[in-house]
Amino acid sequence: MSRIHEALKRAEQERTLPIGAPPIMPDSQAQVQEALPAAPPMPQMPPPGLVDPLGDTQDVRTGTADYLRFDDVWSRCAAPEWRLSLEGNVFIDPAIPPSVREQFRTLRSRLYQLRDKHPLRTVLVTSSLPGEGKTFVANNLAQALARQEKCRVLLIDADLRRPDLHAGFGAPNSPGLSEYLKGEADEMTVVQRGVSDYLCVIPGGGRVENPAELLANGRLKALLEAIGPVFDWIILDSPPTLPVADALVLADVCDGVLTVVRAAHTGFDTAQKSCQQLREKNLLGVALNCADETAAYGSYYQYNERNLSGTA
C-alpha cells in the first residue's frame, strides 16, 4: 500500500508542476540517471541509391561514396589527336573485303554468347609465337565491340617487350602502361580517348628491362579493379606465350584468353603446346588468322560452351 500511496502522491505533485518542468523521481532513480553517461549521437548514414558506374541503372552501394563513372574517365583522361592508320584496320580500310569485317562481328557475337554463361569482361589476346596477328586481332576486336551502341571498350597494350598497338591509332606511346606500372603515372594520365565516343586505349609506354616483374607487381590488377567496372569490355594485347612468361602472368588477371593462330604459318605442335599452357587460364578458344576466305568464310566457325574459334 505504501508504494501505491507514493505513486499517487507523486502523480499529484506532477500535475501541479509548470509545463515543461522535469518529472519528480525517487531519490534512488534520480541518482541512477545522473550516473549514466549521455547517449552518443546517431551516426550519419550515407544516402542510398548511388548511381551505377555504367550510368544506365540504379544501384545501392553502401559504405562508400567514391566511385567512377565512364563520363569521369572520358573527361579526365588524355585526349591526344589520333590519326587512324588504314593499314590493319578492317573497319576503315576500303580495300578490305566486307567478309573480313563480318568475321570480327561474328567473333564479337561469340564472346557475348560465352558471357551469357560465364562472367566475362576482360579478355587477353595472345598467340604462340610472334607474327601471328594477335595485335591485329586485338585492335579490330576492340573496334568491333565499340561499334555497338553505347558499348564502352578499353584496349590495353600489355606487350611491354614490343609495344606497337598505338601505331594503328596514330597515338603517342607514352605515357603508357609501363609508366603506370613503375608508379610514374596515374590511371587518368595513361588512358587515351580519340575518335570513337566509347573506345579508350592505354598504350604500352616506354621500353623496360623487366616487363615480367612489372606485370606481376600488382599494379595492373589494381588498375583493372579501379577503372575496369566503367567499361563493358577490356581487351589486352599481350606477348606470345611460348617465348616468354608474360602472357601467363597477364592471364591471371583476365577473365578469359583468346589465342591467335596464323593459317599456313603456325605448326600444329606449336599451337597445341600454347593451348595446353593456357588451358588452366580459362582458354576461350582460337582465332584463325590469314585463312583462305573462300574455304573459311561462313563455314569455319564452331562454337560450344567452352570453345570459340573463327577466322580473322
Image (cartoon, rainbow, N blue to C red):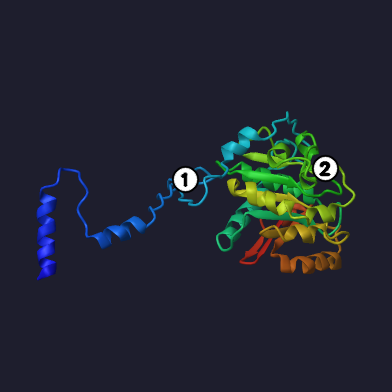
Query: What amino acid type is highlighted by mark number 1?
Result: Leu
Coordinates of residue 141 in the picture (x, y in percent): 69, 48
**In the displayed structure image, the side of residue 305 where residue 272 appears, left or right:** right
Coordinates of residue 33 in the picture (x, y in percent): 31, 57
Residue 297 visible within the image: no
Q: Nearer the viewer, residue 243 or 18?
A: 18
- The local crowd at label 2, few if under 14, some if 14 to 19, many if 20 or more residues have their Cα within 10 Å, is some
| Residue 164's disc number | 2
Q: Nearer the viewer, mark 2 or mark 1?
A: 1
Label located before the other in sequence (2 or 1) = 1
Q: Nearer the viewer, residue 38 or 84?
A: 38
Coordinates of residue 43 in the picture (x, y in percent): 43, 50
Please count the marks in the image.
2
Q: Is residue 178 above or below residue 121?
A: above
Q: Report which quarter residue 303 is drawn in.
A: bottom right
**In the displayed structure image, the side of residue 115 where residue 222 appears, left or right:** right
**In the displayed structure image, the side of residue 155 where residue 6 appears, left or right:** left
Residue bearing the label numbered 1: 50
Coordinates of residue 228 in the picture (x, y in percent): 63, 49
Q: Nearer the viewer, residue 35 or 80?
A: 35
**In the displayed structure image, the side of residue 77 where residue 66 appears, left or right:** left
Residue 310 visible within the image: yes
